[in-house]
Amino acid sequence: MKITTMRIDDRLIHGQIVTTWITYANAKQILVVDDKAAGDKTQQMLLKFAVPNGIKLLILSKEDAIKTLKEDQSDVPTLLMIRNPYEANAFVEMGFEIPVINVGNISNSKSVTGRKKMMDYIYFEERDVEALQSLNEKGIKLEVRAIPTEKPVDAMTLVNKYLK
């Protein structure tokens, strides 16, 4: 399996993913790395309905994804989706390596207090900022953009804005 694009998006699979990001990643499959979805049959069914015909979908826990990535030596182009920055950081700390991560939608969850709006589709809380700083310190480039044709914004610019 060849990860061509990794994207943080709390919606995981939705319209922008199936209309633009699959094409941008030249993906033949999507790997959703999410402990919650991996253990929830209903969420798995909903995610499968969102994936276009001809695209394979894998929904794995972080631990199972690390094992699968180590074992699968194929060149199948894959779009990796993960729910939030702290899960992405945890995945990288488990041994996953990637040079660039696209930071997409991070919603203003009603269940989380203290989120700050950074862009129309990006809201940070403290643990998002800590995770993004950690990923940046590991040398990973963090590009914020909703769709591939948008000019990327350096996520650290938003982190610094949050910290002011």
Image (cartoon, grey):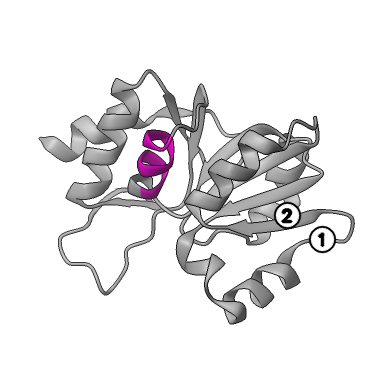
Q: Please name the residue that numbered disc 1 is placed on.
A: 52
Of callouts 2 and 1, which one flags the residue occurring earlier in the amino acid sequence? 2
- Crowd around label 2: few <14 · some 14–19 · many ≥20 (10 Å): some
Displayed quadrant of residue 112: bottom left
- Any magenta on residue 137? no
Task: Identify which residue, 53 or 149, lies in the foreground.
Answer: 53
Say what amino acid the circle numbered 1 marks.
Pro
Say what amino acid the circle numbered 2 marks.
Val
Location of residue 12 in the rendering, given as x and y in whole percent from the top left corner: 55, 58
Secondary element type, mark 2 = helix
Secondary element type, mark 1 = loop
Q: Please name the residue that numbered disc 2 is placed on.
A: 18
Quarter containing the N terminus: top right
Residue drawn at x 53%, y 68% is 37
Disc 2 to disc 1: CB gap under 8 Å: yes
In this view, 34 is above or below 130: below
Apparent side of residue 137 relative to residue 77 in the rendered image (left or right): left
**Numbered range of the magenta stretch:** 87-94
Residue drawn at x 34%, y 22% is 138
Location of residue 126 in the rendering, given as x and y in whole percent from the top left corner: 17, 48
Location of residue 4 in the rendering, given as x and y in whole percent from the top left corner: 68, 31
